[in-house]
Amino acid sequence: MIRVNGEQVPWREGMTIRDLLEERNFTFPMIAVWVDGTPHRREEFASVWIPDGADVQAIHMISGG
Amino acid sequence: MDKFPMNLLAEWNYHRAPLHRGYTRKYLVVDLGKGDGQYSHTIHDIDGDMIDTFTGGRGFGLRILWDSVNPQSRWDSPENALVISGGPICGITQYPGTGKTYTVFLSPLTEQTYNSNAGGYFGPYLKASGFDALAVTGKCPEDVVVSIDGDEGKIRIYAAPTDERNAYDVTEALHGHFAKNEDDKTSISAVTAGRAAEHSWWGALNVSFYDPRRKVARLKQAGRGGGGTVLRDKGILALVVRKSGFTGTENDPADLATLQKVGTKLHREIRNNDDTQCIMRTTGTTHLNKIMNDYDILPVNNFKFGRSEAIGAITPEEYKKLFTQGYADGCWYGCSMACAKTVDGFVLRTGPDKGKKVTVDGPEYETAASLGPNVGIFDPLWTIETNYYADHYALDTISLGTGLAFVCECYELGLLTKEHTNGLDLRFGAGDQIMELIHRMMDGRDDFALAVGKGIRKMKDIFAERYGADRAVMERIGMEGQGLEVSQYRCQESVAQWGGYFLTLKGPQHDEAWVIFMDMVNKQIPTFEDKAEALFYFPNFRLWFSLVGVCKLPWNDVEPSDNRLRYKGIEAAKVPEHVQNYLDIYEAVTGKPLSREGMILQSERVYNYERIFNYRMGKGTRKEHNIPDRALGPVFPDEWNVRKEYFEKKLEEAGINGEGLSVEEKISRLQAHRRGEWEKLVDAVYARRGWDSNGVPTRKTVERLGLDSPEVLELLEPYWRSGERA
């Protein structure tokens, strides 16, 4: 399991940031992702693997409608 | 060419005060008399104290309105003032989104102060014509056009008898009348309404600018709150300002080089990032349609559901095909965000202009959702047509959509029948029937169309009294607060956004706070204190835009590439580099340095002043901060069942054992739990804002903000002493 924004989420071998965002249906483009406190650029989303037990923050930047 | 006669009734010369550091330090009051044709005007000084306390824009509007009305005044009282003001930054051209016009008035819907804003050229041209604000009071016996000629230094009032009172017709005619030639049409801006505003309380104000490429007058709406209704009630066909030769240095800024430097930085950021961020330049705010659907926030069928399988028909890609591409479509000079999208060559299929080929301004997200999924329709062409007619007739598209959604649900529940609707079959998705109702609202054709146009709060009264409709059900599903219809975000699953909508000054609009992602998805504000902090900061930060005359969109619909790496958590959501841009351009225009804390303080003064103002008008206490059940959670089993697993989990998280309970009982328990959460939220937010538990600013807050003027103390002292309204 990993934690995503504080919630328990199933983990699987080889899971990348992009996989996670797709599974959570996090489609908003202005999203910032930290894995265990490390920020990652959008260009890295498809290549960064998320380790089991990781604490992931997927922060949607919008704060205005 | 004139489309209607313009007969001069009054004319005055004035000395055009020069703009210096963003201010003219003058405001104009035009009084239209008491229906007796006695027209007059006065020009007032704006002193340093007024600038220090109220900054400009909406702040000036509230201050001027306070002086004009008394506690017994209502929206249709002659003394109600329609105040229009830009603000000190309004009218610069170096930074995107700096041409906003702010309007302030007593609202027919909420019976208290309202403020609404639009693009277009009126605010900048008004300043360049010598006035930081224009207030119009009184009522005239015939339709008039009030014009301010900044070139000649003349204020004129014309009688303008015409049957063509809808916005595009009037605006086109006025640009033609006041311009010396085709090129000069860009020197004109008009504020108009439309025929629906003569019957409906959803009357919008249309603010124009002339588009020389398309050779049409374009309209931007200060739609909310019924400003157009106030305009027409006064007998005003239009307010017009004329100023030719406008330049990028009209404000006489203190530091032009900084304006250019900061502006260039944001232009570059938009150019580099927009295509991978919010695609504002190609789709405007309709980029939100699919995102809101993905996160269960899109209002479908009167906010019952948050998504639909039919979303494919209204995606940004579909709208992009309809919007004209390749033009930098801003609503003020220098805005490279260019989100003022149009549909050109659109052939109308219904109504009085059927068959006519028109340019439609929009739709933007709010209209695409309200006159779309919220009434069960997923057809962009229908939405574009309703957008055109809503603007033309002067109906606020947000209230119109939410109001029609309420009507559709009442109809489907059997609270209304064809007998009541005069034959209309107003189910969700019944596009032709809903369109017909909109046309009937234009001329107030029957009692039902008139009732709908009065807004949800009044509809509940009328439907109950006239048709015997179940009031308790309507109270649960009617998406309004303080008399204003909710804008197009489904807030059920975000406790903080309950406050973002329903703990506001003027009702559930989205210009105070949009904290749904921060709360519901990011889980960044888990405690009531966290939520209260967000509901302190964001409403105050965002209010600042209305003081200085800028648009919210360039703040957070684009962000620096490294924003998410340099800043974390809520700080990143504030987009600190853009906040700094605003501080820089404020100082570059006014010559006065401003800190982040100082910015919030400027806003907090006006926020609390408006709250006190509403207390003065008999509102402004806790009992006005109501929230309907539909905003808190599911009301009927179909809403529960569509997300059954999710709601079962929410019940469990609330510590409620759902075993053996019917769906109706589960809904009831969840609603009761959430209403308890709501009360906790209210307490936390009031405490953070420096208000007492009744929602009234405390003596300490009033003194801290320097609002302890004799008139405010006279109003609040009795309450502070007794805890009750005097």
Image: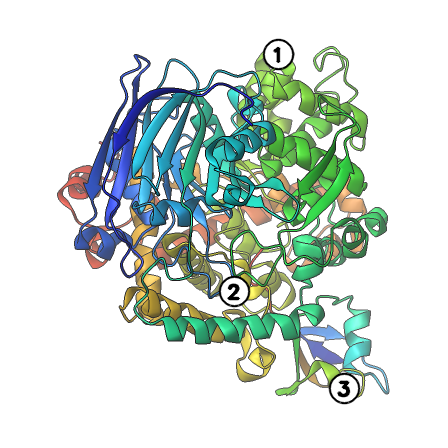
Crowd around label 2: few <14 · some 14–19 · many ≥20 (10 Å) = many
Decide which of B223, B717 is in the foreground and name it: B223
Q: Position of residue B313 (x, y in %)?
A: 84, 48
Relative depth, front residue between B233 and B360: B360
**Is label 3 in contact with label 2 (beta carbons under 8 Å)?**
no
Q: Are marks 3 and 2 on the same chain?
A: no
Q: Identify residue for label 2.
A: B555
Name the residue carrying label 1: B447
Alpha-carbon span between mark 3 and mark 2? 32 Å
- Total numbered labels: 3
Q: Quadrant of residue B486?
A: top right
Chain bearing mark 3: A
For mark 2, name the chain: B
Residue B80: where, in percent of width, then height?
A: 33, 28
Image quarter where the C terminus of chain B lies is top left
Q: Residue type at mark 1: give it.
A: Asp
Q: Secondary structure at mark 3?
A: loop
- Can residue B634 be seen here? The reply is no
The amino acid marked with disc number 3 is: Ile
Neighbours of disc 3 within 10 Å: few (<14), some (14-19), many (20+): many
x 49%, y 39%: residue: B626
Where residue B490 sits in the image (x, y, percent)? 65, 48
> According to the image, label 3 marks what residue?
A50
Q: The residue marked by circle 1 belongs to what chain?
A: B
